[in-house]
Image (cartoon, rainbow, N blue to C red):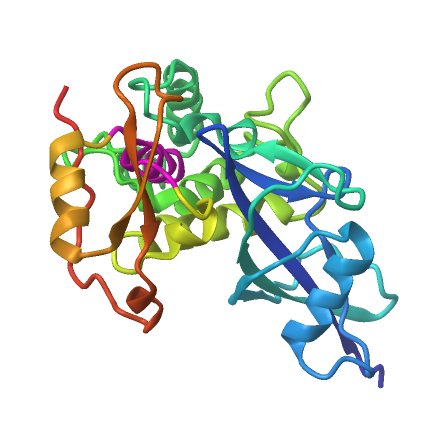
Amino acid sequence: MTIGFAHAELIAVLVAVTGDEPRVMTIRNALPSGPFEMGHRTLQSGLREWIQEQTAHPVGFLEQLYTFADRDRNNDIQGGRTISISYLGLVNEQSGAGRPGWHGWYEYFPWEDHRDGRPDILDDLIARLRLWADADPVRREYRHRRADFTFGLDGGGWNEDLTLQRYELLYEAGLVAEAGASKDDNLGRPMFADHRRILATGIARLRAKIKYRPVVFELMPESFTLLQLQRAVEALAGLTLHKQNFRRLIEQQELVEETGGATSETGGRPAKLFRFRQTILEERALAGTKLPLSRN
């Protein structure tokens, strides 16, 4: 009888917001990763060691994201199985730190950025999904319903939190390189093995998290304007927010305080500088908070 064994791999989705764009750290075309070894005290400390060794980039906020153990995952061990334990980290991008690369989220998921309106790629994407759905007479109606729901075509509108479901539907339809799509047919920038799926999981987690916890401040400089804060949230959500409602929300939740300084980098009147209120570090939740979307 052959006894299989599992190999534990640690993977990091490290996110930064730079120049109003959400970006992810990569090592070539993969996420930073490494095996969990006997010398590692904990899973998280083991991942931090791999990040330090591979990129020399400092990491602050880090939380466990998801464990991937599907049987059809990329397995490099003969007779074994790879279990990947992923983490989501929030950092400030630093140039010259180690050997990491940085790429925008929307290179991998161009259909997810709605800040300038509905992305043009959605028309082609939906047309391909329709063809895929029609190709199976038995499951045709079910496939159409899934496409309509995940891409907001059912009257419910676009739901930014469904990033993972949208990618998995495209994978099932064979429209991404990881599922065998040709270079010409592939949608979005591919990644090694199932790392794009892991990235989609991290994006979905963070998009949901910024609605009830002020984790966005992990991505901000020490002082910032309210416009910079709004742009960072918009970058993560892939949506345009209502300016007055956003500022009212920040004020009501008492998330920030004035530093007493100002900046003229906005090009107009000097804008007040704010900082994150230290009391927010006490795990204060923003229960029930919803993003104030722009109606324009």
Q: Residue furthest right?
A: 78
Q: Residue furthest front?
A: 260
Q: For this view, does 213 lie left or right of residue 4? A: left
Q: Which is more toward the observer, 58 or 173?
A: 58
Q: Which is more toward the observer, 145 or 220?
A: 220
Q: Which is more toward the observer, 241 or 278?
A: 278
Which quadrant of the figure contains the C terminus? top left
Q: Position of residue 155 (x, y in %)?
A: 14, 32
Q: Residue at x 37, y 16 (%)?
A: 123
Q: Is residue 34 visible?
A: no
Highlighted range, magenta = 224-240
Q: For this view, does 59 lie left or right of residue 253? A: right
Q: Position of residue 91 (x, y in %)?
A: 55, 50
The secondary structure that most of the magenta stretch takes on is: helix
Quadrant of the rendered image containing residue 1: bottom right
Q: Residue at x 53, y 39 (%)?
A: 171
Q: Position of residue 293 (x, y in %)?
A: 18, 34
Does 17 appear above or below 53? above
Quadrant of the rendered image containing residue 48: bottom right
In this rendering, the count of numbered labels is 0
Quadrant of the rendered image containing residue 192: top right
Q: Which is more toward the observer, 101 or 166?
A: 101
Q: Residue at x 17, y 40 (%)?
A: 247
Q: Position of residue 176 (x, y in %)?
A: 58, 32
Q: Is residue 18 magenta?
A: no
Q: For this view, does 97 lie left or right of residue 151? A: right
Does 140 appear above or below 66? above
